[in-house]
């Protein structure tokens, strides 16, 4: 499903900074994997590379057999659109769109018929238990509800891969637990491969597998 071979990422600037160094990793279909490590260890960089939001300086990343380094920008966009859903810590919802419109936005970009888009968006909001909030704007929702909308949007095309960067990091403990339970329930229903970057060891310990990073390298790969 996801394969990294000797991947490094170096950021050039006034000072050269190595975010990842010689990382090799295999993640099988359907696994739920947490990525942990101290600040600056390379967690988010790793997630961005797997998600095709950035390109490695060296090494190879494959998603379902496709080498991301060999893809054009257009083909990389296609992979992100069709195979990967993203959930971010700060939700990234458009404030002027209601819940239904936020979830529907990726489907409009795929040029689906309007009725099909509306039906899928309603289905997803029902899946995350927000079918009673269809017309609410993001600032009319709690933090947990906003994250549920963000998860529904990430699942718009039922992608085989879901990448979550600190999905509970901006939430209180109780709401964070609800979001984590929701992700677990969605995994059991959809069977997606899920990667969660987190600093919360409780979140990490609920995942099937935990990959620990330090100074841009994998220092531990533990399975439950």
Image (cartoon, helix red, strand yellow):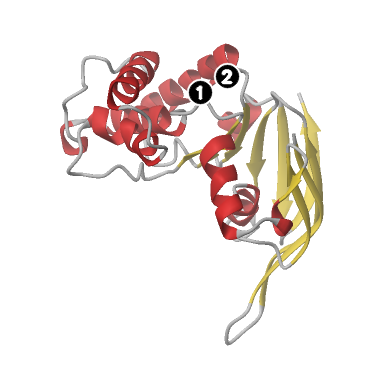
| Residue at 71% in and 35% down | 210
* Circle 1 Cα neighbour tier, 10 Å, few/some/many (<14 / 14–19 / ≥20): many
Q: Residues within 10 Å of mark 2 (few under 14, many from 20)?
A: some
What's the mark number on residue 183?
Answer: 1
Residue 126, placed above or below residue 109:
above
Image coordinates of residue 69 in percent, x first then y, are 72, 58
Image quarter in which the C terminus is found:
top right
Kindly identify the residue that appears in the image at 70 percent across and 62 percent down: 56
Residue 151 numbered tag? none
* 83 vs 146, nearest the viewer: 83
Residue at (16% x, 25% y) in the render? 135
Query: Element type at marker 1?
Result: helix
On the image, the x and y values in percent for residue 25 come to 80, 44
Asked if marks 1 and 2 touch (Cβ < 8 Å), the reply is: yes
Residue 195 visible? The answer is yes
Q: How many marks?
A: 2
Q: Tell me: 92 left or right of 57.
A: left
Q: Is residue 121 left or right of residue 196?
A: left
Q: Looking at the picture, tell me which residue is in the foreground, 136 or 19.
A: 136
Residue identified by numbered label 2 = 187
Above or below, 15 relative to 222: below
Depth order, front residue of 62/18: 62
In the image, residue 13 sits, relative to residue 149, either above or below, namely: below
């Amino acid at each position: 499903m996801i394969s990294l071979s000797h991947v490094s990422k170096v950021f050039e600037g006034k000072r050269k900074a190595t975010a990842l160094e010689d990382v090799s990793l295999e993640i099988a279909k359907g696994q739920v994997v947490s990525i942990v490590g101290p600040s600056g260890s390379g967690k988010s960089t790793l997630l961005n590379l797997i998600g095709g939001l950035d390109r490695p300086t060296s090494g190879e990343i494959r998603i379902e057999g496709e080498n991301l380094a060999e893809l054009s920008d257009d083909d990389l966009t296609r992979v992100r659109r069709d195979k990967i859903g993203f959930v971010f810590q700060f939700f990234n919802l458009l404030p002027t769109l209601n819940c239904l419109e936020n979830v529907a936005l990726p489907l409009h970009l795929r040029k689906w018929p309007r009725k099909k888009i509306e039906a899928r968006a309603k289905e997803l909001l029902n899946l995350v238990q927000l079918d009673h909030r269809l017309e609410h704007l993001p600032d009319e929702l709690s933090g947990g509800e906003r994250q549920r909308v963000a998860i529904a949007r990430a699942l718009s095309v039922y992608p085989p891969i879901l990448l979550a960067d600190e999905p509970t990091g901006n939430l209180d403990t109780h709401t964070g637990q609800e979001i984590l339970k929701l992700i677990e329930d969605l995994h059991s229903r959809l069977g997606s491969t899920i990667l969660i970057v987190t600093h919360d060891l409780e979140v990490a310990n609920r995942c099937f597998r935990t990959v620990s990073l330090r100074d841009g390298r994998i220092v531990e790969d533990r399975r439950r």
